[in-house]
Amino acid sequence: MYSQGSESLIRQARDIEESELQKFYSRLIKVLKVKEHGHETVDSLQRLHLILSANKYSRQTDLSSYCTQLLRNLENRQSEGLSLTHTLPILNSVITHSPDCLTEDHVTFLSKKFVDWLRYASITQGGGASSGGFFTGPRSRQPPPITELDGTVSGDFFTVLCVGQGFTEDQWMNVYSFSMLRHWLLTYHSVSNDDRSEVDGSVVSMVSATSSSSRLLPPKERLREKAFQYCQRLIEQCDRKAHKKTDTDLQKACLVEAVCVLDCVCSEDTSLVYRTFPYIKALFGRLSSDLSFARVLLPVAQFYLNHGEVAAVDCDVVWKLVFGRFPAELFNDNFLAHELLRFLRLNLDSLKFRVKTRELGPPTYMIRTEHPFCVQMLAWNSPALVDEFVDLMPSLVTAGTAVELLHTLLDLPCLSATLVLQLRAASLPIAEAGARGLVPLEAFRNPSFRGLFLFLLRTEAGTGSDTIDRLSTLHELLAEAADWPRVVRCAQIVPVMLHVFFNAVIKVADEQLLAHLILVILERSSLLLNIPSYSKEIHRVFSCHLLNLCKLHPSLVVDQSHELLEFAGTTTNVYNKEEIYTHVVWVLGEYLSVSCDSRCSVNLITSCFEALEAVLFEITSSTPPSGGSCPAPRVITTLMSAMAKLASRSHDLIPRVSLFLSKLRTVTRGGSVAWCADEEDLVSIVTRGEELWSLLKTPGVAQSVLTPPSYITEPRWHRDTNMAMPLRLRLLTHLTHSQ
């Protein structure tokens, strides 16, 4: 990232000893007190700049005396040795790392200087503008005026968007001042430090509203007024057609900074909102149709968010653009993706508050698009954005969005493939013989399947809910996309996002919603894009959180007993969904109990037992399906344990499970069996069967062991003062300490 020489300088700056740093700092203070400053002073200042930047998180140096001397030189500069253009950038670094080093007098002084540099810089070009010559007369040597980016002569004050063959020092200070203006305002112009009390409030309001006689204002107020005028002029300058592309890029960058500065000054003085909004609104109207200005429109959206209510402006058109067109059409702009997610993270609380305080009535666009905006960006550039989405996900999960968000996360690889197809469809010819990925591309262009792809590309929530019935068709159409690098990378981050989702949903969902999510888990376990190891990873996540949900709310097992039994009673799930099947069987055996839910009847326990019994009998009395592997030993032992638990709660079932366990021991005496290829696994299965069989001979003991009460599984003997255990522990502690 850096050249070898730059890395060496940075390393030296970081490795500087504390004693050497203090000596260098003391010498610099002495040098600054000298009236004449040369290159040595400039080099020392630049070295300090590097040290501050390289050690901003690990070193604390007291810069108060340095700032005092630097500002004194800035105020009383007599020599030309120390250029102002070197001073201001270094001062910016100083206040970045140590803002408390400036006193109120320093802030007032610099605010006055900023006003002069921003508003009263020279309007003629600097030295070197004239070609000169032997016969050049005094009149021809007059410097020409500055020009605009379109080549016309500037008729107003100098800004960063003015053009000339050379620039004077005060023009350079104008550029530097604007570059650090927003940082300065955010650091030292907070409302708590507002100095409007120095002038009568009515006078301030009148002067601010008329923007005249600004010299009556105190320094901070006057700087805000000049900052407003400067940014107003920049916005007007950006209406001009630049001759060079680099100047067009400069216009965009200046627009971003200008809107951000206006946002700062309006936050400090709300009276400026009414003067500013016409310019911001006009700017939005001019740029909103051109998505090449998307980076500019994000600060505009921030301005609307911060000040729209004060100005009573309808912001829905802004949200429709930012949360609708941006992700849908600019999903492959990686820089914009980071900026948009940063915008969401910084304003998440404000956005959520505005949604909650909406009056009853038709939903606004922000509410309708609370999800799934920006998911397209995650699907396109998954690894780079996963950290941002991990932070955002808990706030996106609500009772209203949880189900759709879960489906969206599971379909993320399909969305990634669809975005690739969308770009290919726009660039490739209709028919390209022998082209790889032609089947998905033809499907994308086929009107019969258009609805499926449009559902994935949707920008509003709650549409196309019937599309899940055609997911298997969609997965068949995208089969060739399963090994596309972008799709594979996208699939790798889905388990991470699912963990974040489930950890968040248990904090906002009621039991009814959690019951619905269990249905989605069971349903989507077989409706996943066929990517190598993808289904296995998703099943592992499903299994983990199915256990968590049922542990938190055991009654969910009774609520969804029909669907859980249907899943557990399907023999094919043993072979292709081992992970989740094992956990479904476990929760049935663990929580289908009267102690967990009084609605759990004997008939329900018997139905569950019979479903598990049928599956266990089938997989232990036949060979595996052709081409398939033997059932996992864990599945068999989990089935046996679940049946034993159920039988311990309904003693009429004990003879049936005991008969099976005894037959199992008899069958395995003859050696290997078709349903277990490994001898050690078979021994473990038989051992587990014998343990369960022995327990069931005494039903009372079996129930205590297989379904222990909570005071057994979660003992608090060491805390219960009514038990003898605390007394014994204290006695043992006393004896140990005595020794």
Image (tube, helix red, strand yellow):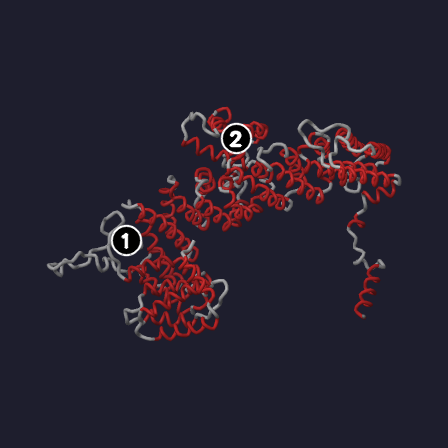
Taking 402 as reference, is 152 above or below it? below
Question: Mark 1 highlights which residue?
Answer: 162
Hey, which quadrant is residue 469 in on the image?
top right
Q: Under tag 2, what secondary structure?
A: helix
Residue in the picture at 40% in, 28% down = 429
Location of residue 478 in the rendering, given as x and y in whole percent from the top left corner: 53, 30
Quadrant that contains the C terminus? bottom right
Residue 421, given in percent of the width and then of the height, sits at: 47, 32
Three-letter code, disc 2: Glu
User: Relative to residue 244, is residue 379 drawn left or right?
Assistant: right
Residue density around tag 2, few if under 14, some if 14–19, many if 20 or more, within 10 Å: some
State whether residue 184 is above or below residue 575: below
- Residue type at mark 1: give it: Cys
- Measure how far apart labels 1 and 2 are at the Cα level: 54 Å
Which label sits in the foreground, 1 or 2? 2
Is residue 598 in sight in this rendering?
A: no
Query: Along the horizontal axis of the image, is 623 left or right of 294?
Result: right
Q: Is residue 112 left or right of residue 614?
A: left
* Residue 571 in the image: above or below residue 365: above
Q: In the current view of this chain or complex, which residue is farthest to the left?
A: 135
Per the image, the residue denoted by label 2 is 480
Give the image location of residue 295, x and y in percent.
Answer: 41, 46
Disc 1 residue crowd, few under 14, some 14–19, many 20+, Cα 10 Å = many
Of the pair 619 and 130, the residue shown nearer to us: 619
At 39% across and 65% down in the image, what residue appears?
A: 91
Secondary structure beneath label 1: loop
Label count reads 2
In the image, 278 versus 352, the foreground residue is: 352
